[in-house]
Amino acid sequence: MEGLLTGLDTFLIAPFRDMASLPDFLLQVVWEGFVSGILYALIALGFVLIYKASAVFNFAQGIMVVFSALVLVSLFDLGVPAWLALIITIGVMGLLALTIERVVLRKLVNQHEAILLMATIGLTLVLKGAGQLVFGGEPKSMITEELGLSTGSTDWEVFGGFVIFQHIDIAAAVIAIIMVAALALFFSRTRIGRALRAVADDHQAALSVGISLNQIWAIVWFASGIVALVTGIMWGARSDVSFALEIIALKALAVLILGGFTSVPGAIVGGLIVGIGEKLFEVYWGPMFGGGVEAWFAYVLALIFLLFRPQGMFGERHIERV
Amino acid sequence: MLYREAGQFKTTYADDQALLPIAQDRIGLLLILIVAFVAMPMFASEFFLSSIMIPFLVFSLAAIGLNILMGFAGQLSLGTGAFMGVGAYSCYKMTTIFPDLNILIVLLLSGLFSAAIGVVFGLPSLRIKGLYLAITTLAAQFFLEWCFIRIEWLYNYNDSGAIEVPQRMLFGLAITGPHATPITRYLVILSVVAVMTLVAANVLRGRIGRSWMMIRDMDIAAELMGIRPLFSKLSAFAFSSYYCGVAGALMVFFWLGSAEVESFDINHSFLILFMVIIGGMGSLTGCFMGAAFIWVLPVILRAIPTAFELDILAATMEHISSIVIGVLIIFFLIVEPHGLARLWRVGKEKLRTWPFPYAN
Amino acid sequence: MNIKKLGAIAVALATFGVGMPVAQAEDTLFIPSLTYRTGPFAGGGIPFADGFADYFNMLNERDGGIGGAKVVVEECETAYNTQKGVECYEATKGKGALVYNPLSTGITLALIPKAPVDEIPVFSMGYGLSAAAIGEKFPWTFVYPTTYWNQLSSILKYIDANGGVKDKKIGFIYLDVGYGKEPLPLLENLSESMGFEVAKYPVGVKEMQNQSAQWLNVRKDRPDWMIMWGWGAMNPTAVKEAAKIRYPLDRFIGNWWAGSHNDLNSVGKSGKGYLAANFSGIGQEYPAVQDIITHVVDKGNSKVASKDDVGNVLYNRGMYNAVVLAEAIMVAQAKTGTKSITGADMRYGLENINLDDARLKELGLEGFTGALKGSCADHEGAGSVFLQQWTGDDWEKVSDLIEPMNDVVRPLLEEAADKYVSDKPDFKGQACG
């Protein structure tokens, strides 16, 4: 009985006591979680955009993040001014979107979604090989300052302690919010955006009112290419631009489960839950398991969540009929 | 002309239900087995056996495991690597706890642990389908990987966190450990894989296998027709994980000789997934073809610069082989989503009417 | 794709299996180089492989090889993956390979049991299994110039000399794989005998670039010193995160795989003050490095991206690996009296190596590293490390060579070696006089 009580205490009560005892530190943990959550959300957003319009589960989103950041950095290394490099990179992502649509997707219309998923896994391999072939495998540093992003930090004194805010993290948050707002506007206010939603709702109906599926697909791939670029810049600034980043992108899959495959707000909220949740868990509960629990926390959370709500937080309930 | 079943009459039900009803197929299989069991050990070089045949057989078995789940039961999984790990670690634990137990028995028992873990992580499949399920299998992958690192008991508190294969004998011959020759290791693996493939072929065409296929084709309809989804799905997970587990144990004990957790990482799961896709979902022959293709192609590509004395960096070939495999996967999905196995079947059909394709 | 093509593949395979080239030409020395120019750790693998290959190329160009026999270096790409490493081993061992440098702890562990059977030594320079330092137990494995355990003891000595280690809290942040966990037993042992507290921060391979949780824990625990066993993308991320939480970087010490130019270049100014252990010299000033530039790099025969990369920490370490091998080959040639040698001769050469200061000067490497002398029992040389500090754009040597605590570490290594062979009755050791 005694043992059980102490066990309950260490697992259920002590972590919260820790949180309360150092409120400034708790705030810092939450902020760090918030920032990584935003980055997860951005990757997830790329997935959602494509899935919504074409029911393609784009496994290559992670490598697109690395690829776009590599193009940007390598162009700069070749002596191209930062702003021009950024524009060219956007152009490259557009070209990539067109190629993918023309060469892969158009040929796979109407296939089962598992097959489409595997096609994007094939795409991942191609981009990975081509990226390393062209740019080399060494990690490169992100041209943060050249892009006009500050690398400094600001302290906020609070609760008798302090919380450090990196400017780049603040920028990531602001840019993410602007991007989501822009996407929301784009979806609801523009012609293409409405066409996109129509395609998402019903391919055939959209086709019959004269919406070009091919065009829409190229546009969503382009849009998620830009999302990938922004993610690549932000994450690259936090560490390095290297192919190891690709694995982190897998965590966005857990985010997708929480948020649902088709919901933009779901991706954001899911990202924040995973980001903040895993930091809190790692910092306050991790030591009990010997640390490193971040590696699976997101997935196991998603798994448990799925058992109770298979359609995700914002997904629509799917009723199957024979 | 040669490959034609005309004149082969089946007079009993047993004949009709034979695994290979056509005589030419039986002869072909026999030839393959003779080549594999007799000719290979006699003529193949040591490198060919230990770097091509042994990995090929191990991966074929793992691909069969994944294919049972994906191709026959329709449940997508990205956790194959981790299930192989469960098999490898349990084999290691058992053989160090009971060193006198025959290693082959240990090997076959280790699959049971993998099967049990597979059932646990298969539970969500009762509620979740398709891509969502694929992502939950990632939870299995990452959680198990973490366990392989954090639970030190699994690798006997080894400082380096790796499992090292001890020497085990069979009929007075070393079959594991550094003193086991490639030929003995090859023959052991070949026998295990051959027997397990035969078992799989029979299970798949039996009652259980058919219930898996019904679940795959439409689970609600299958349920209405009296198939219990709980039993079918979980048995598919158990069966598949058993095969993966044995493949993992084979990989460590008869191929690598030692393993760290990276030997079972997510890339490993993908590798086997590619084999299943290229080989063909829902085909046992396809598993062998896919494994051969995915494993051997890079080996050949890597040998090209040395063979032709080209001054290409080994790393460049690595990138190129990654691109080539990626392109091939996409190509197959577009041109022949049923993989190499389907091409094989088409080829056989053509062969039946050859040399007069319009005669019928 | 049809049957014909499948047939073609089968034919290609068959010729491949049978027609492997078995013997190299008469007077060459074949050295396979297991590299990783791809994958998550490529950043460290590339300069190391360049330095390794360039030194042998330089010897071929300048001296016509070693003792008149040309050195053939064949690279095999492992991507830091054990399966591929084992495949590389199988593919090259038949070509008369003299020695293997696995360049990964996982591959080293896989090759250690194979070495005595195939009679090809394994030289894991400063990585792999620390216990392999015990020559009686591991005749075919070498870990010159020193082991992870000795290195850790040197680092702790440095801490002790700079403010004492007793009653301090030492944080250990490590890559959560075999490599990173290797020194843990020693750390725990020393924490008792030297009286300090240890806080451990594992970083998963997949989380290498996502370390904010670990560093938040560091901020909470406030260790007096941090020691890092990192590799690849983990290193720059860790230094950046440390700077972010305002951890004093001059109290943050990386091991010798966590202190290269490739790691810190991307960190730049904000990494100023970060310390790292090292055992190979930095820079291009050494005559041997100059020779490489004249004979290889300037002629365009090197794979380095730019000439400035020559002399970088990892480039020089790869070169040092080649230096040790070249010296061992010379010892072996002197013993056998022939130009071409076997793996067993190579083992003799490695075991009887004696790179003292005079010899290093002859090789054009004066002051590059400490003296190295092997013996039958001692396969690590108990070499010393020095500490270097990042100035914001380059590394600067800041300490003399720090001797390891041999008296403490050696018994522990022996214990570990005994443990390794205890469940392997077939693992043959050797008796040393």
Image (spheres, rainbow, N blue to C red):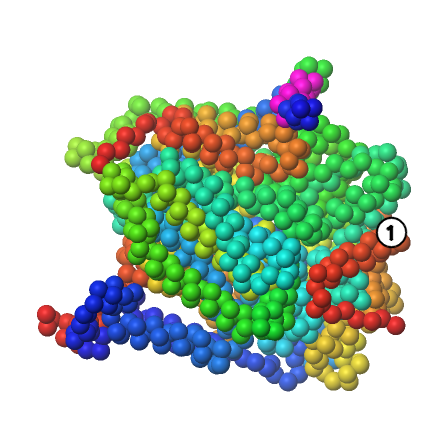
Q: Nearer the viewer, residue B287 or A9?
A: A9
**Left or right, residue A232 beside residue B160:** left
**Residue at point 66% right, 83% down?**
C27
Q: Position of residue C4 (x, y in %)?
A: 30, 73
Residue at the extreme top of the image, as rendered: A159
Q: Quadrant of residue B94?
A: bottom right
**Left or right, residue A229 beside residue A9:** left
Asked whether the viewer can see residue B116, the reply is yes
**Residue at point 54% right, 73% down?**
B184
In the structure shown, which secondary structural element does the residue marked by tag 1 occupy?
Answer: helix
**Residue at point 25% right, 63% down?**
B17
Q: Main secondary structure of the magenta part?
A: helix
Residue A21 among magenta residues: yes
Q: Nearer the viewer, residue B289 or B100?
A: B100
**Left or right, residue A135 beside residue B150:** left
Q: Residues within 10 Å of mark 1 (few under 14, many from 20)?
A: some
Q: Position of residue A36 (x, y in %)?
A: 55, 31
Q: Position of residue A218 (x, y in %)?
A: 31, 41
The quadrant in which the C terminus of chain C is found is bottom right
The residue pinned by badge 1 equals C408
Q: Is residue A25 above or below residue B122?
A: above
Q: Position of residue A37 (x, y in %)?
A: 52, 29
Q: Quadrant of residue C102?
A: bottom right
**Residue at point 46% right, 34% down?**
A303
Asked whether the viewer can see residue C298, the reply is no
The quadrant in which the N terminus of chain C is found is bottom left
Q: Is residue C422 above or below residue B50?
A: above
The chain ID associated with circle 1 is C
Amino acid type of the residue that numbered disc 1 sits on in the rendered structure = Val
The magenta region covers A11-22
